[in-house]
Image: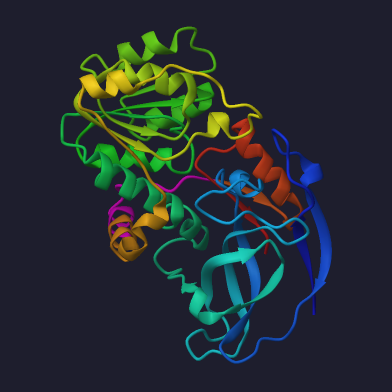
Amino acid sequence: MKSQAILLASRPQGAPTAAQFQFETREISAPTEGQVLLKTLYVSVDPYMRGRMSAAKSYIAPFEVGQPIAGGVVAEVIESQSAALPVGSTVVGNLPWQEFSVADAKTLNPVPVDKAPASYFLGLLGMPGLTAYFGLLDICQPKAGETVVVSGAAGAVGLLVGQLAKIQGCRVVGTAGSDEKVAHLKALGFDEAINYKTTPDIAQALANAAPNGVDCYFDNVGGAITDAVYDLLNKHARIALCGQISTYNVTETPTGPRPEGKLLKTSTKLQGFIVSDYHSRWPEGVAKLTEWYAAGKLKGEETITEGFDQIPAAFLGLFAGENTGKAVVKVA
């Protein structure tokens, strides 16, 4: 059978554009022993994929030019050579951007669609949820009454970090890029939310929002917001370094403040992490996130784009702040 696929056409210099993506029709072979044929239902687009478009060494191999881009996908098994995954199963895995694909059953995880919408296993109950869970609870270890600041708070991870911090009894401050997102954060229970694009003095705004200083900082963004947070750190503060989206598309590394002195004086712990560091504990994280979701303590937020041909546009929209919560593309 034939399938549309989206390939990496070239490596971007600076911000990626539509020119980096190439559509191609590919022949899909029948599954062999232990394999399944999959129909793509939902595709995840994530900021980390920008790093994989470059050839630079990182924690994960770069995408290959001329080959399909791959990421989180929820799919339906339509033909099976595996007893573990019968026809009709819904699964999640790291799969190519294709309408149809063949994969080894052992590389896929069944999705319990009776517990949550299938797309949530790319967000709240998937990689972003686990990133929020381990970054906040394992690295920051917030205590009731402490102040938690989250940058990129309206994104797939940030929205969940804020909600998890409220479950822990914390005061939560988030930054986002529009008044609509700020209103959304407050509706989710954030104590304060700041539109960094329209705030003339982000440092003063953060100081006003965190009058007792900052105990935990979940950093998705970097840049000027992070510089401002460093001035508000309390003794023994904890920082989970999750992302630096403000610099993902720069062609030269910007020179900024050197924060080491502030970290030293406050005995702050700064830890960078990748969610795969916690792979052995993912079942624990999924179980807790599912429990809180079922109890109504966590809300999954999504921006859903429809159509396989819209995957590149949805990905590019991440860097323009077009999504609130998890950005996913509904393919079928």
Regarding residue 5, the answer to whether it shows in the image is: yes
Residue 140 placement: quadrant: top left
Quadrant of the rendered structure where residue 194 is?
Answer: top left
Tally of marks:
0
The residue under the point 81% across, 71% down is 26
Q: Provide residue 71's location: percent of width, then percent of height.
A: 59, 58
Give the x, y percent position of residue 126: 44, 57
Q: Residue at x 53, y 67 (%)?
A: 93
Q: Horizontal and vertical percent for residue 187?
A: 39, 31
Would residue 195 be visible to someone looking at this image? Answer: no
Task: Tell whether 207 sits left or right of 142.
Answer: right
Q: Is residue 120 above or below residue 262?
A: below
Q: Nearer the viewer, residue 185 or 277?
A: 277
Q: Nearer the viewer, residue 85 or 6?
A: 6
Question: In which quadrant of the rendered image does the C terminus lie?
Answer: bottom right
User: In the displayed structure, would residue 155 be above or below residue 283?
Assistant: above
Image position, residue 208 (x, y; %): 31, 11
Is 253 colored magenta in this rendering? no
In the rendered view, does 121 fall on the left or right side of 204?
right
The residue drawn where x is 66% and y is 48% is 55
Quadrant in the picture for the N terminus: bottom right
Depth order, front residue of 228/312? 228
Whether residue 326 is situated above or below residue 66 in the rendered picture: above
Is 30 situated left or right of 80 in this image? right
- In reply to whether residue 300 is colored magenta, the answer given is yes
Residue at the (46%, 72%) spot, across then down: 109
Q: Quadrant of residue 74?
A: bottom right
Q: Which residues are magenta?
A: 290-302
